[in-house]
Structure formats: C-alpha cells, structure tokens
Amino acid sequence: MKRIETRHPLGNADAFPEGLAVLREVNGRDICVLRDGDTLRACSAWCPHQYARMDGSPGEPGHIVCRYHGLRFNMVSGDCTNASGYSVEIIPLQTDSQTGEVFALTFDIVDD
C-alpha cells in the first residue's frame, strides 16, 4: 500500500485577507481558509456545535471563531478552546513559494 497526495488549488495567497475565514471547496467539501499573519491554515467549514458554516467568521491569532455562538477552534489542533467535546478537522495546506498559489492537500491509500 502507498499514500497518494493530491494538491487542490485554492487561489493565490493574496486572496485570503487577515482575520476572515474564506470559503473554498475541496473534493465536494467546504473548507475555511484563514490567514494568521504570514501563515494560512484551513479547517472544515462547519462548526460541530450546531452545524453552522464558518465562512465569514472572524479569526483571532491561531483560532477561528464561529460567528453564531462564539466557539473558538485552535487552527493547529482543531480543538475547541472554550467548550469541551468539540473539534474541527484541520486541512493541510501548501503554498508554492515561487507563485504564491495555495493548495489543500488530501491523501489516499492505494494498493501497490
């Protein structure tokens, strides 16, 4: 078995403003991309609390905040930092240092 990595284009890094979650689609799934300084991070676009979409939600350093009920999710671990039992999936990103293009990474396991 081997792991296959697929890169899904999300746009140029300049398309993601500081502190605002931007919606993108990867393989039919909604994700939110959030800029934190020079770092871009992504997570599933749905808050697990009451399944509200989080695009347009504010970012705080290292976190995305659900605009509906204020749950804060760490953008490295995915864990909710102000309510127990909730987490979001973190989506790995890669930025091309030459072009500034940002890619979401997905992985599949296939037989050799």
Image: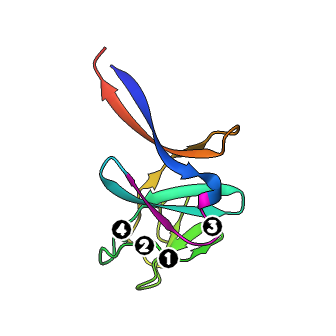
Q: Residue at x 66, y 64 (%)?
A: 36
Horizontal relation, residue 41 to residue 109: left or right:
right
Q: Residue at x 70, y 37 (%)?
A: 98
Q: Residue at x 71, y 63 (%)?
A: 37
Q: Position of residue 87 (x, y in %)?
A: 41, 65
Q: Quadrant of the N terminus?
A: top left
Q: Are marks 2 and 1 in contact (CB under 8 Å)?
A: yes
Q: Position of residue 28 (x, y in %)?
A: 29, 51
Tell me which numbered mark, 4 or 1, is placed earlier along the sequence.
4
Which residue, given by chain and number where applicable, does mark 3 sit on? 17
Mark 1 belongs to which amino acid? Ser
Which residue, given by chain and number where applicable, does mark 4 sit on? 46
Tell me which numbered mark, 4 or 2, is placed earlier along the sequence.
4
Q: Residues within 10 Å of mark 2 (few under 14, many from 20)?
A: many
Q: Residues within 10 Å of mark 3 (few under 14, many from 20)?
A: some
SS state under label 4: loop
How far apart marks 4 and 1 lie (CA) works out to 11 Å
Query: Which circle marks residue 54 in the picture?
Result: 2
Which residue, given by chain and number where applicable, does mark 1 sit on? 57
Horizontal relation, residue 53 to residue 41: left or right:
left
Range of residues picked out in magenta:
15-25
